[in-house]
Amino acid sequence: LNAYGTLIDQMDDIVNPDSSTTGPLPSEEEVSFVEERWIILQKEMCQWSVLEDFAADISSSKLSMECAWKMRNWDKLRMLYPSPPVVALLESGDIDVKMSEIFLAIADGKLIEVENLHAQTAQLCLYRWQLLPSIFSGCNAHNELLHNFHRLVDIRESGQIMVKTSTHSSGKTCPDLKNILHAWRHRLPSDFDSLTMWDEIFQWRSHMFKAITTNFQWAEEGTLASLHDRPWTSIRMANVARKQDVPEVALLTLSKLTESAMDISDAFAKLREQILSYRNGSEVERTSGLNMINATNLEYFDANQKGELFRLKADFLESLRLTTKATQAYCYAVQLCPSYAKSWTSWGALCSSLAELVERQNRSLAAENKLDKDKAASNAKKIVQYFAQSMGCYLEAIQCDCSNLNRIHLPRCLLMLSKDGSSAGLLCSTFEKYATKLPSWVWLSWIPQLLTSLCRIEARAAKEILSAVLSSYPQALYFSLRSFYLERRDQERSRSHTGTKSGTSGVSQAEELMTSLRKAHPSLWISLESILEELIIRFRPSYEEELLTTITALLQRAESQLEHQATGNGKEFDEAAVRASFSKTLARVSAKFFRSYTD
C-alpha cells in the first residue's frame, strides 16, 4: 500500500488542480488509471463512505451498489436496481452486480428468488471458468472466480440461515446454527489474499449476524451469543489486516465490536489485536499501545492472559529503548505464569540482543584502541552473563512447550557455549542445569552437534544428554555414535604415532556410550551390526570405481608436488625420492587391480 501513496497525491492534483501548476493537463488515460488504482486503495482500506461519495460524483452505479450493500443501505440498493446502467450490467452478466442482487433478495426475505438467482450466478461463474486457460498454466485469472465460488457457498448457507431464522423466530425457539458457524470459521480466504477479498466475505457474514441478533432480540444474552460469531469474525479480520501491515483497518474493524457481547477469551483477543496494531508504528503510537496496556483491568483474565499482557508491555518497553523496565516486565510475566513459553522466549531474545550489543561496542572500542584490559574483562563477563540468561530462558521455554517455535532456539543455545572460553564456566553450567531436563526426543535432530560437543568443554552435559537419548532412542543414536567413535579413535592413534598432542578427542566418552548401548540393548546391537555389515557388503564399490578413485588421488598428489616444486617452500625438492614413492604406489595399484605376466 505504500506504493499507492503517490497515487493519492496524483488523485488530489487531478480532483483539485493547482492554478499555479504549469504544463499540460493529464490525459484521459492517465486520469482513468489513477482513478482505478485509487479505488482499489480505498477498498483495501475499507473506506466505503469515501467511495460512496466518489461513486456519486462519477455516477458509477456498480460502485454505488457495492458500497450500498456493504454499508447496509438497502433502500439505496433497491433504488439503484431498476436503473438503466444496472439493468445493462445484469444483462451483460456482471457477476458482482448479480451478487448484489442476491444480497438484496436475502435482505428482503425473498428466499425462493434467492435460489433462482444463486443458480443463475453459479452457471455464469462456471461458464466464465471454462473460458479460462488451465489452472496449472501459471495464470492468476482464476483467483477472482475462485473467490466468487467461495461467496456463492456462503450465500447458499445464508439462505439456509434465513429459513431457520424465520421458522424459529415465529415460534420463539432458537435454531441450531453451530454446524454452519463452524464451517464459516474454517472456510476462509488465504492469508495472502488481498484485504478486499477478506472484507467481502466478512462483511456479508457480519450482515447475517446482524440479522440474527435482530430477529432474536427476545433471547437471553448467552443464548443469543451462541447464534452468531461476530466477535471472532471481526478479530480474525483485524488479525489479517495487521499481518498485512494495515493497522488502520485492524483498528477500524475492532472499533465496530462495541455493540456485541463477548466472553473473556474474545475480549482478550480483541484487546491483544488492538495493542499489537500499535507495535510497528511511530514512537507516539507505541507509547499509546503501552498506555493501553497500563490502563487495562487484569482482574478478569487468567494467568496465561496476564502473562501475555506483561510480555507485550515488555516488548513495547524494549521498542522504546527502556531495557531495564522491559526486563522487570518480563520477570513479572514469568512470575504470573511460569508455564507460558512465549514470555521465556521473548525474554531470551532481549538478553541475547543485549549481549550482542555489548559485543559490538567491544569491537568498535577495540578498533579505535580505546579498550583497556579492565574494561575488556568487565564486558566479557557481562556478555557471558547475558548469554547465560538468554540460554536459560530459551531452554525453559522448550521445557514449557516443545513446539517447533521454541525448539528452533536449540542450535542458538549450542552456539552460545563457544562464548565460555577455554574452560567450562557459567554457560556450560547453565546448559547442564536446563538442557538435561528436556525430553530426549527434542535432541534427535542435533545428535551430530552433541557428539562433537564431546570434544569440547561442555562434554559432561553433552554426554548426559546423549545417555538419555541412548536409553530412549538407541537406534537413532547408534550409527552416528559408531562413526564418530571410529573416526576419533583413528585420529587419536595417528596423533599418538606422530607424537602430536591434542585436546580432548571425545574417544573415551564415545566408548563409554558404546559400551552402555551394547549392555542396555544387546539384541538391538547385534541386529544393527548385522545390518551394517550387510550394507558394507552390498554397497561396496566396484573395482573400476576403486581404480578411478585411486588414479584421481594420485593425480591430485602429483599436482600438489608440482606446486610445491614451483613455489620452492620447505626443503630442497628431491625428484628421485618423489619418483620412487610414486613408483612404489603404482606397483601396489598394479598388483591389486591387474594380473601379472606369470598369472
Image (cartoon, rainbow, N blue to C red):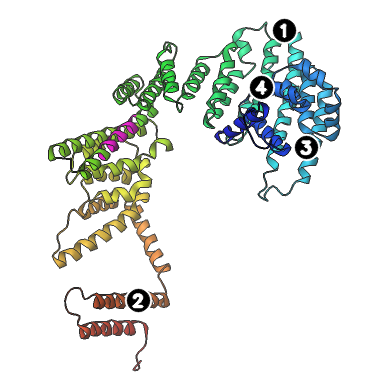
Work out how far the residue at label 1 is from the one at label 4, CA to CA, in angstroms: 41 Å
Q: Which stretch appears magenta?
A: 347-359
Q: Which residue is drawn at 34% across and 90% down?
A: 596
How packed mark 4 is, by other alpha carbons closer than 10 Å (few <14, some 14-19, many 20 or more), is few
Q: Label 1 amino acid?
A: Lys
User: Can you tell which of label 2 and label 1 is closer to the viewer?
Assistant: 2
What kind of residue is marked 3?
Cys
Tag 3 or tag 2, which sits nearer the N-term?
Answer: 3
Name the residue carrying label 3. 125
| Residue indicated by mark 4 | 50
- In this rendering, the answer to whether 556 lies above or below 97 is below
Q: Which of 593 and 99 is in front in this view?
A: 99
Which label sits in the foreground, 1 or 4? 4
Q: Is residue 1 visible?
A: yes
Q: Does the magenta stretch include residue 373?
A: no
Crowd rating for badge 1 (residues with CA inside 10 Å; few <14, some 14–19, many 20+): few
Which residue is label 2 attached to?
Answer: 550
Please state which of residues 360 and 293 is positioned toward the viewer in this rendering.
360
Considering only order in the chain, which callout, 1 or 2, is on the residue closer to the N terminus? 1
Residue at the top extreme, as displayed:
218
Along the line of sight, the residue nearer the viewer: 1 or 77: 1
Q: Which of marks 2 and 4 is nearer the N terminus?
A: 4
Examine the rendering and report whether any part of residue 473 can be seen.
Answer: no
Q: Distance of mark 2 from mark 3, alpha carbons?
A: 68 Å
